[in-house]
Image (cartoon, rainbow, N blue to C red):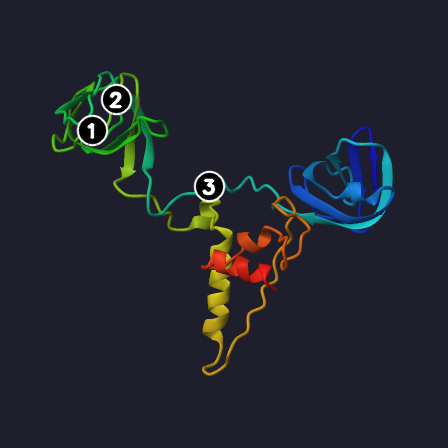
Amino acid sequence: MIRRINNITTVTTYSAHGLVAGQMVMIDGVEGDSAGRWNIFGQILSTPTPNSLTLADPGLTGFGGGGTVTPMTSPPNDAVPGPFTFDPDNGFAIAATETTSNQVIESLRGISTLAVASTSGFPTSGYLVLGFGTKYEIGPVKYVAILDATTFIIDRTFTFPKDIPVGVNVSLLYQNSPWVPANVTEIGAFYLTDSSSGRIAAQAFIEGAAAAGVNVVNRIIYPGDRGIGGEGNPITGVYLSDKVEVWAGDNVDQEVAAAHNV
């Protein structure tokens, strides 16, 4: 059963749902009073009982029945510090040690020393990144030694590609290469790929697993198109759902044109 009162929707399930506050869920297929308005995607506010949950859902008071509740996110896990995304091919692996610069650096020049607020906590040599996460970001910059409590000796062969003002953050690099954890699950990491790459990889796997001499005919069954262009349109004909393009293969234009011509 589902009901909306005072802009709060309460859903009662037939069995224990196992969901928790903060999870995102999708509710659809509800029948009854203006059933179409019960197609909801939202965040659970509370779970008053094992068989009920509430969501913020502005609208008129109403009631309905049937339908499904589909979790769109996993329950929070306080034991995992993620989720994090990281690029194993690019970017900086910064450490917790940092300071700020105390000098102006002119572009297209090398410097022999870098004045900072403090060199405390930095190893005797290593790599730095200046302005991490800002428009001034530059690195890795090698320092060969620490001259004193406020000065790094910088590798003169490094040329700064842009002007750097006073006060820019100076971070120690954990290593002079992108960071790749030994076990991605321990940090709550996840893999992020574009939609078409997933479809291409799946199709290639199926074709590669087929026995020699067997011609594989692929039939692409697309996911739903809620939230993208052309929602509800077919996958063939004049007016297509954008899911044909979103989950297309390597030859997007060719595949879309073929769908138009069916």
Picture quadrant where residue 217 is located: bottom right
Answer few, some or many: residues within 10 Å of disc 2's Cα (few below 14, many 20 plus, some between 14 and 19): many
Compared to residue 88, the image places residue 212 above or below, namely: below
Mark 1 or mark 3, earlier in chain: 3
> Cα distance, mark 1 to mark 3?
30 Å
Number of callouts: 3
Image quadrant in which you'd find residue 259: bottom right
Q: Is residue 118 above or below residue 19?
A: above
What amino acid is at disc 3? Phe
Residue receiving disc 2: 164
Residue 246 drawn at (x, y percent): 54, 52
Residue 129 appears left or right of 60: left
Q: Which mark is residue 160?
A: 1
Residues marked 1 and 3 touching at CB (< 8 Å) = no
Q: Callout 2, which amino acid? A: Ile
Marks 1 and 2 in Cβ contact (< 8 Å): yes
Number of other residues with Cα within 10 Å of mark 3, as a class: few under 14, some 14 to 19, many 20 or more: few
> Label 3, on which residue?
84
Q: Residue at x 20, y 25 (%)?
A: 107
Q: Nearer the viewer, residue 173 or 261?
A: 261
Q: Amino acid at mark 1?
A: Phe
